[in-house]
Image (cartoon, rainbow, N blue to C red):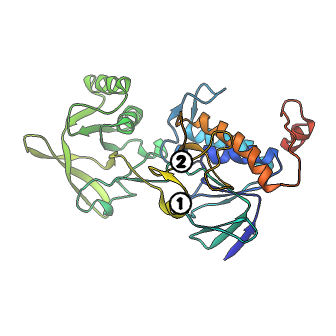
Amino acid sequence: MSRIETDVAIIGAGPIGLFAVFELGLLDLKAHLVDILDRPGGQCTELYPEKPIYDIPGLPIVTGQELADRLMEQIKPFNPTFHLNQMASGLEKLADGRWKLATDAETEIVAPVVVIAAGGGSFVPKRPPIAGIDAYEGKSVFYAVRKMEAFRGKNILIAGGGDSALDWTINLAPIANTLTLVHHRDGFRAAQHSVNQMRELAAHGKINFEIASVKALHGDNGQLRAVTLSNAEKKEWEHACDTFIPFFGLTMKLGPIAEFGLNLTENLIAVDTAKFQSTTPGIFAIGDINTYPGKLKLILSGFHEAALMAQEAFHIARPNEKLRFQYTTSSSNLQKKLGVA
């Protein structure tokens, strides 16, 4: 086991976990972050890196990847340590009152404070019930669009009726050779303006829309050449395509966090709204993983929660020191930490 001692262990390196590093850093608290993904950014970079976000204060429009990049730049002065491609697998209270967080990569992080910023847990795409689909995954079947350029000039088939399916139909249409959206009914669970955009593209012949379901895949060595489509009348036909992107939703798995002995309410961690601490002292939950009266699952709400969490974390990690509240705009001490003095 690799054993590390620090002030705060953070589970989750999404936007909320990253901003927590900033708030903790202002108070001279060192943080280590654990994330199951291979890079920081969480859902923003994993599921919609190029999708615009419009409700981040001061940023009228920013993509998921840009937001993660800006947060990484913001926390650079505090030099956090990332333990990526690792799942938080166990949590144990030590005799001295600190916590020992273990990962599946045999890393142990010992800290007086643990912050769970894991969103809703690990998101796993729902695999369509199509025989042999696993043979095509990663080569011609994809469950997320990470780089749009990888799909330029492709003959794309998108399946689904939610926001992701409609959004990517609209965004990929200009760069695809051909693009077809299939859904089992002529009704959608997406925003109406997206549905209207899709229908306009179809009306102008820029995409195809089929009311059908995908029944089989055809190809060799992981490369798709066609799929079998079937409609409500049980009529089947082959549709040529080289790329299949099914959006059948995501399965949210809390994973080992559910076994940490915390007070869970429908897989969410109940917290107070003064400190965002769980019912277990020293363990905090911020972002989509927590619940409290009036909770809004917004990134900006998580930023607020991170700020209040850091204040209490200081009292736990530095019990013999006095916390002095300072503003970054007027404190030369904080500005020196940020490298802007």
Disc 2 secondary structure class? helix
Q: Kindly identify which numbered label has been placed on residue 315.
A: none
On the image, the x and y values in percent for residue 276 come to: 64, 44
Tell me the kind of residue under disc 1: Ile
In the rendered image, the quadrant that contains the C terminus is top right
* Residue drawn at 82 percent across, 46 percent down: 27
- Rendering quarter of residue 274: top right
On the image, the x and y values in percent for residue 37 come to: 55, 57
On the image, the x and y values in percent for residue 334 come to: 87, 40
Q: Kindly identify which numbered label has been placed on residue 257.
A: 1
* Residue drawn at 39 percent across, 38 percent down: 164
**Farthest residue in the front direction?**
279
Tell me the kind of residue under disc 2: Ile
State the residue in front, 73 or 36: 36
Tell me if I can see residue 291 in this picture: yes
State the residue in front, 65 or 237: 65
In the rendered image, the quadrant that contains the N terminus is bottom right
Q: Earlier in the sequence, mark 2 or mark 1?
A: 1
On the image, the x and y values in percent for residue 266 come to: 44, 49
Quick check: marks 2 and 1 in contact, CB under 8 Å? yes
Disc 1 secondary structure class? helix
Which residue bears the numbered disc 2? 289
Count the numbered circles shown. Answer: 2
Could you classify mark 2 by the number of other residues whose Cα lies within 10 Å: few (under 14), some (14-19), or many (20 or more)? many
- Rendering quarter of residue 178: top left
Tell me if I can see residue 75 in this picture: no
Q: CA distance from mark 2 to mark 1?
A: 10 Å
